[in-house]
Every structure is written in structure tokens, then in C-alpha cells.
Amino acid sequence: MGFLQGWNDGKLFISFPGNTSLSEIGYKTEWTRRRVAEHIAAKGNSDFIWEFEHGFQNGYSAILRMV
């Protein structure tokens, strides 16, 4: 789930109308924290929440390498 969320966030950001550069989401650490908090609110906390965070960061990085 984290990988797909990161991928989709990155894709949305780089395809935003008027974005003429390959700039990245600012405050990536805070963005990740917010997405993790949203995930916990929706699914609950666990000892494996790091997997969502790790997947999110990898998904976001993967989409940026594609462009």
C-alpha cells in the first residue's frame, strides 16, 4: 500500500498542470509523516508501520526515476 501511495503522490505532483520542471515535493519527510498518519488512522497502528513508510518512500523515488 505504501509503494502505491508514494507512486501515486509522485505521479500526481509531476503531472500537475503548469509544472514545467521536474521539481520534487518539498518537505518530503513531513509529507511521508502525514501519509503514515493517514494510513494509521485508516488501518490502525502496528509493529510493521515501517513497511508502509519504506514502501511510500520507494514508490515516490521510483516514479521520479521514470521521468
Image (tube, helix red, strand yellow):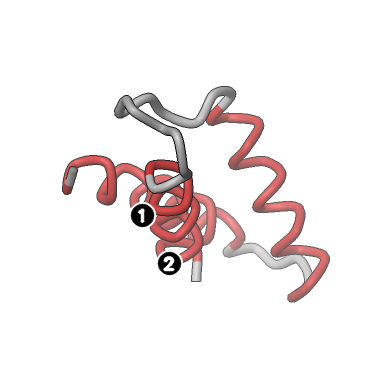
Q: Is residue 67 above or below residue 50?
A: above
Residue 1 at x, y = what percent?
Answer: 50, 71
The answer for how far apart the CA atoms under marks 2 and 1 are is 6 Å
Q: Which of the two discs, 2 and 1, labels the residue nearer the N terminus? A: 2
Dot 2 alpha-carbon crowd within 10 angstroms: few under 14, some 14 to 19, many 20 or more: some
Q: Amino acid at mark 1?
A: Gly
Q: Residue at x 54, y 24 (%)?
A: 26
Q: Is residue 42 above or below residue 37?
A: below
Q: Amino acid at mark 2?
A: Leu
* Quadrant of the rendered image containing residue 24: top left
In this rendering, position of residue 24 left or right of residue 32:
left
Q: Residue furthest front?
A: 18
* Quadrant of the rendered image containing residue 27: top right
* Quadrant of the rendered image containing residue 20: top left
Residue 31: mark in rendering: none
In this rendering, position of residue 31 left or right of residue 63:
right
Q: Residue at x 18, y 43 (%)?
A: 67
- Give 38 or 50, whichever is nearer the viewer: 38
- Give 66 or 48, whichever is nearer the viewer: 66
Please report contact status of discs 2 and 1: CB closer than 8 Å, yes or no: yes
Q: Residue at x 66, y 51 (%)?
A: 35
Residue 62 at x, y = what percent?
Answer: 25, 49
Residue 4: mark in rendering: 2
Residue 59: mark in rendering: 1
SS for tag 1?
Answer: helix
Q: Is residue 41 above or below residue 18?
A: below
Residue 64 at x, y = what percent?
Answer: 27, 41
In this rendering, position of residue 23 left or right of residue 56:
left
Dot 1 alpha-carbon crowd within 10 angstroms: few under 14, some 14 to 19, many 20 or more: many
